[in-house]
Image: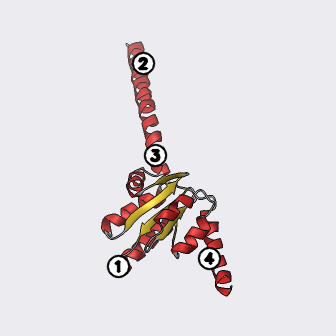
Amino acid sequence: MAKIEQKKPIVEEIKTYIDGAASVVLVDYRGLTVEQDTELRRKAREAGLVYKVYKNTMVKFAIEGTPFEELGKDLEGPTAVVISKDDATAPARIMAEVAKKADKLELKSGIVEGTYYDAKGIQVIAQIPSREELLSRLVGSLQSPIANLARVIKQVAEKGDNAAEA
């Protein structure tokens, strides 16, 4: 009975992290060096992600009855949980970025905005730029035609002034 009481706070902590999360990604961190793990944790922290290693049974209890329940089938072997409340693609994107240097890091699966993705699907999600990057691209593409229109109007106005002076 005492063991169950000791495990409840851990399960509650996991539930708190996943409550309202935009995405949860599972990674296999086996074989990472201390330097690689430190870098991974630093990048996750900078991106506002929660990166935690829990016992698989604790995670299974915590995700039971939640939109993340489907991840239970991938909780085998050493597994870290990466959670984002805001940027749905950030966990996959940051972990894939770290995996380029740390080839032992393996993306297992994830749930992004309510949809389950296996390892291949998470790799595809990792290719999606961040929300900020997409917004800046949109603003850039909107600014270009406006700037061109302003240049044309300016040239027409200058021609009109030159014609009036003559």
Helix, strand or loop at label 2? It is helix
Residue drawn at x 42%, y 76% is: 38
| Residue for badge 4 | 10
Towards the viewer: 61 or 53: 61
User: Mark on residue 33?
Assistant: 1
Q: Earlier in the sequence, mark 3 or mark 2?
A: 3
Of tags 3 and 4, which is closer to the observer? Answer: 4
Residue 60 image point, x, y percent = 56, 68
Of tags 1 and 4, which is closer to the observer? Answer: 4
Helix, strand or loop at label 4? It is helix
Vertical comparison of 11 with 22: above or below: below
Work out how far the residue at label 2 is from the one at label 1, CA to CA, in angstroms: 70 Å
Helix, strand or loop at label 1? It is loop
Residue 129 image point, x, y percent = 42, 50
Give the residue type at disc 3.
Answer: Leu
Q: Earlier in the sequence, mark 4 or mark 2?
A: 4
| Residue for badge 2 | 161
